[in-house]
Structure formats: C-alpha cells, structure tokens
Image (tube, helix red, strand yellow):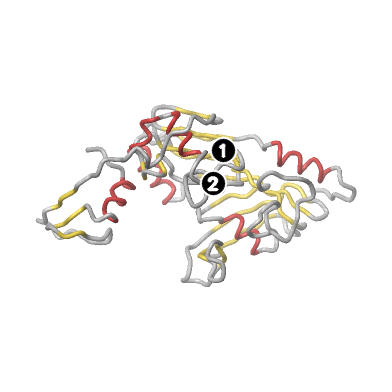
Amino acid sequence: MDVSRARLQELIDGGVVRVDGAARKRAYRLQGGEQIELDVPPRTQDELRPEPIALAIVYEDDDLLVVDKPAGMVVHPGAGHANATLAAAALAHAPAIAAVGGPRRPGIVHRLDKDTSGLLVLAKTPSAYDSLSRQLAARTVKRTYVAVVHKRMRTAQGVVDAPIGRDPHHRQRMAVVAAGKGKRAVTHWRVVERFQDFTHLDVSLETGRTHQIRVHMASLGHPVVGDQTYGAKLRPPVGLEGMALHAARLSFVHPRTQALHEFTASIPARIEGLLSHLRNTPAAGSR
C-alpha cells in the first residue's frame, strides 16, 4: 500500500489508525509488540474536483511539476475559495497526483499567498512528496522573491530573525510575537533599487512561515506594496493587481536523481509596470 506521510497523518488524526484496538495521537511512541490496524477509507470524488485551467508550466517530469502561479490564484481550496485553485488545475493536468499528499492539497508541499505570484513545485509521487517535505524542513530549498515595499530603506541589506504566530487581536492575521509564542522565522533582504518613497528588494527565505515576508517587512515599517492585510492604509502609486511580491527563483535537490535543480520566473508585468512608473517619477532616487 502506497500511502504518503501527509495522508497517514490525516488518517491518524481521523482515528482510523488503532494500536491494540485504541486510536492514538501522532505523538504516541510504539513500545514494540503492539498490533496496528489501519482502515484506509476510499477517497470520495467530491474531495477535490479537477478543473482544466491552464498552468504556466516551467518544468515537468515523472516526479515533479514546477509552475509559475499567477497573482489572484489560490493554491488550494479554503474558506471562500472552493474553485479555480491551482490544486484543482494540477489534478486535471496530472490525475495521479490525487494520491499524493492531502485530499484537498494534492501534491502541494509549499504554497504562495493568493496575491503573490511565482514559482511553486508540486510532487507527483509520494516519494517525491516526502523528499521535498524533508528538504523544506531541513531548510535546503532555496526561495528568492522580488518585492517592492513602501518607504525608502536606508541600509543596503539586512536580516529579520523574529518569531511569527497568530495575531492575538486579529485571528485572520499573523504577527511578530514574543519569543516562545510563535515559530522562528528568518528573512534575508537586499536592496536592488531605491526610489523616493519605495524600495525594490530581493528577499530570500530561511524559513517558510505563513505570510512571512509580508509580516517581517511590515514589522520593519516597510509593508509590501499592494498588501491589503498588513499595509492597507498605504496605497500603491499605480493600479496593481495583487501584491508587488513574486517568487522569482527556486532551487532544490531532485528527489530521484539527487541533482540540484534551479528555476527562475521573470518579473511579471504588474511589477515591471510598477517599477517603470517609479523609475520615471521625478526625484525617484537611485540605487
């Protein structure tokens, strides 16, 4: 039986994995000699329906699918976003991916926010899923983003090492929290270009927490342009679909060949248009 780690965790949480007749939590440690029973329920057709939505495929083989996600597309179904997800599009493109990962997140090992564009890798087999998940946990997957943030940053580069957790005052948001109350989050940033009231950055992730770049940049007083959650009071200088945040570079070790794979995705038109506007604005500044 070929069951992914994520699927097995779901089954444990659902109480269908029993040790000596009793359901156990994930943290339970086997002592040896126990009898383990596992009833794998069949996947229902309505768990996630494939949708034939065009994908910008950057790379594909028998194990992996790397796509350039557009801003505005949700990665997997969630509250208020049941249809037109990247997961449903991937399921239509590669039906076998249904057996990989969770039933509502087939093949998804990491994600991008709805209004963030760029590179995302999906696993097409359970072994690829496990390998990529281990690499993410070990922080060997490299992800670099292009970002435009509000206000002119004074220093050339920096690191934000601040834990992120659920905002105690706004449960739909994340926030920098006190040590011990969140998960460690580390973001590296470097100035590419400065403007009068904005800064173009290269940002790389050492960890991968929810909304990490958005939260960390806002904590510095430089929210991402177009971020309606952490910078809602600041307006973009021009019309902008989504946020000025794009996953431009991605690298990882191929689960089967063990070769290093590196991918790039060009800066999308919405961010190029914003940068062009800023460069042509009087007193725009310089690098």
Disc 2 residue type (three-letter): Leu
Disc 1 residue type (three-letter): Lys
Question: Would residue 106 appear left or right of 271 to someone viewing this image?
Answer: left
Label 1 sits on residue: 69
Viewer-closest of 227 and 272 = 227
How far apart, in angstroms, are the residues tagged by discs 1 and 2?
8 Å
Residue 276, placed above or below residue 228: above
Residue 17 in the image, given as x and y percentages of width and height? 21, 53
Viewer-closest of 68 and 85 = 85
Label 2 sits on residue: 112
Q: Say the numbered circle drawn on residue 269.
A: none
Question: Would residue 168 appear left or right of 97 to someone viewing this image?
Answer: right
Residue 174, placed above or below residue 40: below
Disc 1 secondary structure class = strand
Image quadrant assignment for residue 104: top left
Residue at x-position 89% and y-position 51%: 283
Marks 1/2 in contact by CB < 8 Å: the verdict is yes
Residue at x-position 19% and y-position 47%: 39
Residue 189 in the image, given as x and y percentages of width and height? 64, 53
Residue at x-position 46% and y-position 37%: 88
Q: How many neighbours does mark 2 have within 10 angstroms: few (below 14), some (14-19), or many (20 or more)?
A: many
